[in-house]
Image (cartoon, rainbow, N blue to C red):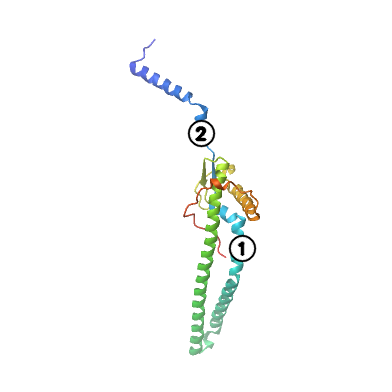
């Protein structure tokens, strides 16, 4: 029988010791990983609270949007008139109509920019307000469900996590739970999660992808 060298014996005993130490780890020290994914921005926009607030913004901005559309139609009509007239207009009349068109175009551009800035700003405020509340609720919800970690999944167009099983995503469940507790709070019933374990939300949350009114 071939004899083992001292180095081989040492390696053999070391391996046995390593295997033995791993086998002796008590089950109580083994941590069960419960990792899920979430599309946070989508969840914010799917909440009943955000949808109601954004619908209110759309109603409030509707008159300004109608004015913009009317002004845009007026600009289009002036362009067509100048184009259709062709050489029938005198130089003076053509210049007068062109100056009128230029003024209308500048007015349209200015009002459209104001509308875009105002509507996006207020939509962002709605998003941030709901996002702060949903983030705080997520901390409690995750603790209640014993999640080890909640990963941002992103959107299909810009994924953060490239693949997860369908049952790992909690976006829909979180939205339903948040809507339920929001309804309970607004109606005065004490069905919301324990507020004593709330974690403070971050000062900065993801930018809103919300559609402006």
The percent coordinates of residue 201 (x first, y second) are: 50, 51
- Give percent across and percent down for residue 56: 61, 64
Total marks placed = 2
Query: Looking at this rendering, what residue extends furthest in the top direction?
Result: 1
Residue 209 in picture, x, y percent from top left: 53, 58
**Which residue is rendered at x = 54% and y = 58% of the image?**
129
Badge 1: residue crowd in 10 Å (few <14, some 14–19, many ≥20):
few
Up/down of 63 relative to 40, above or below: below
- In what element is the residue under mark 2? loop
Gap between marks 2 and 1 measured at Cα: 45 Å
Residue at 56% in and 54% down: 44
Q: Quadrant of the C terminus?
A: bottom right
The answer to which of 175 and 178 lies nearer the viewer is: 178
Occupied quadrant, residue 169: top right
- The structure residue drawn at horizontal position 52% and vertical position 28%, both measured from the top left corner, is 27
Label 2 CA crowd tier, 10 Å (few <14, some 14–19, many 20+)? few
Residue 106 in view (yes/no) = yes
Query: Tags 2 and 1 in contact by the CB under 8 Å rule?
Result: no
Q: Is residue 65 above or below residue 132?
A: below
Look at the image and tell me in which quarter the N terminus lies: top left
**Residue 39 makes an appearance in the image:** no
- Badge 2 is on which residue? 31
Q: Specify the label residue 146 is tagged with.
A: none
- Classify residue 59 as left or right of residue 150: right
First-in-chain label (2 vs 1): 2
Q: Is residue 23 left or right of residue 170?
A: left
Name the spot of residue 77 as percent of width and height, x first.
57, 79
Camera-nearest residue between 75 and 51: 51
Secondary structure of residue under mark 1: helix
Q: Which residue is mark 1?
A: 55
């Amino acid at each position: 029988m071939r004899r083992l060298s001292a180095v081989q014996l040492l390696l053999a005993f070391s391996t046995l010791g390593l295997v033995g130490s791993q086998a002796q780890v008590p089950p109580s020290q083994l941590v069960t990983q419960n990792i899920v994914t979430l599309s946070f921005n989508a969840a914010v926009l799917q909440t009943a609270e955000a949808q109601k607030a954004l619908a209110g913004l759309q109603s409030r901005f509707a008159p300004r949007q109608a004015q913009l559309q009317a002004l845009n139609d007026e600009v289009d009509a002036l362009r067509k008139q100048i184009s259709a007239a062709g050489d029938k207009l005198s130089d003076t009349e053509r210049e007068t109509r062109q100056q009128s068109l230029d003024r209308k175009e500048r007015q349209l551009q200015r009002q459209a920019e104001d509308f875009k800035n105002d509507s996006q700003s207020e939509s962002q405020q709605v998003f941030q307000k709901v996002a702060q509340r949903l983030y705080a609720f997520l901390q409690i919800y995750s603790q209640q469900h014993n999640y080890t970690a909640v990963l941002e999944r992103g959107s299909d167009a810009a994924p953060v996590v490239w693949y997860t099983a369908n049952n790992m995503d909690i976006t829909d469940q979180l939205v339903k739970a948040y809507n339920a507790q929001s309804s309970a709070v607004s109606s005065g019933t004490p069905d919301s999660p324990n507020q004593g374990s709330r974690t403070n939300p971050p000062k900065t949350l993801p930018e809103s992808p919300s559609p402006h009114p």
